[in-house]
Amino acid sequence: MKRKLYLITKTFPHEGGETAFLSPEFPYLSENFDVTVVTTEQTADEKRMGSEISIIPQVHLLDKLSGLLRFLGNADAWREFADIIRSGHDRLAQICRGLMFGTAAENFYRRLRKETDMCRETDAIYYFYWADYKCFGLTMHRSKYPHIHVVARTHGYELYDERELYGRQFFKPQMDRELDCLVFVSEYGKNYYLNRYHKKDGVKYPLHRLGIRKHTDKAPWIARDQEFVLVSCSNVVDIKRIDLIIDGLALVEEPVRWIHIGDGTLRNSLQDKAREILGRKKNITYEWKGTMPNHAVMEFYRQQPVHCFITTTSTEGGNPVSIQEALSYGIPVIGTKVSDIPFMVEGNGILLSENPDPQEIAGAISRMCRMEEKAYNDWREKAYQKFISAYDADKLHPEMVKELLEL
């Protein structure tokens, strides 16, 4: 009989959110465990799928008040507030933020306990895909359930201080104390956490990168006499700094076709900027593809010859799936020196500085355009081999499952 595993997600198994990251891992979990997915951001018009529980955050005033009072009865709350006061900055704002975080955590825990067999099941695993308030909700009450195991992955927004309002991740020491295992998706993120919280490396802090399924036996070949195609793929938001790509292309003299996949709040303003800056350049053409599901992105790479993938992001949670997808088709990468991107771009592309200017970006694109055939093809092969060695889901996810089975 398979062990019970509750997988706490945001939107998975529905489209959006972390589905692109979790879809390759889920078949391995299902094969080895009796899995129930607990989705927490399901919209009203989405139908539940199979063994799924939907726990949407409560919005009623009485629920919030009740959760707040229960939270204030927990010693973890006062430990955090004492630390905030000692920190000496934004004390009132941080305490208010901590109260909101803790209240949401307490309310989620109550719903989770009601919807699952937490009190009765022995040896069950609660696997939080994000180490956020939901994970804290259960770890606050972990001492009541010595018969279960609690595991969390941590990625970016719930790991790095600078990604959180007021530059503080809340309740991390309290959460860490009660977790059986905290799984990191990047070496950079793991080192950040161990240094930030003065932890020693060990079995409690494993590194398990995310990966995607292999789709072909070798990197596809692209003739160099074809139009040079540059692709970027991301949400159109501030931290992705797509405006830098536009500014860089404005300085490029070689013929380039730029395609962006993704959508977001800045799309209209960036389209206006592209029309203004690139519209008068005869050597540059561009196209906005908008949002595409991952299978459509992979099909795009299969049909459309692409010479280079570019990202000018200012931050990443780990190893971007968008870069993994490009590597899986043997596409060289231009990327910024943030998070684990330096690990992904080793002899298979060009690593930009952490905060590149348009001249640096233009230089990287022009260099890729002018490369000799042999050197360029060597980068393509190394891009594909990086995927095989580091991001093939058929190698990565069985290791994660083994970690869970050994709890």
Image: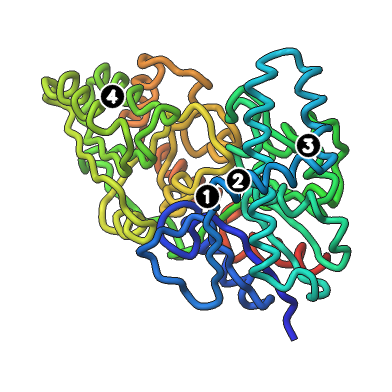
Relative depth, front residue between 203 and 133: 133
Q: Residues within 10 Å of mark 2 (few under 14, many from 20)?
A: some
Q: Amino acid at mark 1?
A: His
Q: CA distance from mark 2 to mark 4?
A: 45 Å
Q: Position of residue 70 (x, y in %)?
A: 74, 47
Is the residue under label 4 in contact with that under label 1 (CB below 8 Å)? no
Is the residue under label 3 in contact with that under label 4 (CB below 8 Å)? no
Instruction: Specify the label residue 60 is tagged with.
Output: 1
Relative depth, front residue between 368 and 131: 131
Is the residue under label 3 in contact with that under label 2 (CB below 8 Å)? no
* Residue in view at x 27 percent, y 33 percent: 267
In the picture, the quarter occupied by the N terminus is bottom right
List the single residue furthest toward the bottom.
1
Q: Nearer the viewer, mark 4 or mark 3?
A: 3
* Residue in view at x 54 percent, y 61 percent: 39
Q: Nearer the viewer, mark 1 or mark 4?
A: 1
Q: CA distance from mark 3 to mark 1?
A: 22 Å
Total numbered labels: 4
Q: Position of residue 236 (x, y in %)?
A: 35, 35
The reply to whether residue 195 is in sight is: yes
Q: Which residue is mark 2?
A: 64
In primary-sequence order, the first of circles 1 and 4 is: 1
Q: Which residue is mark 3?
A: 77
Q: Which residue is mark 4?
A: 246
Q: CA distance from mark 1 to mark 2?
A: 6 Å
* Residue in view at x 49 percent, y 48 percent: 321
Q: Nearer the viewer, mark 2 or mark 3?
A: 2
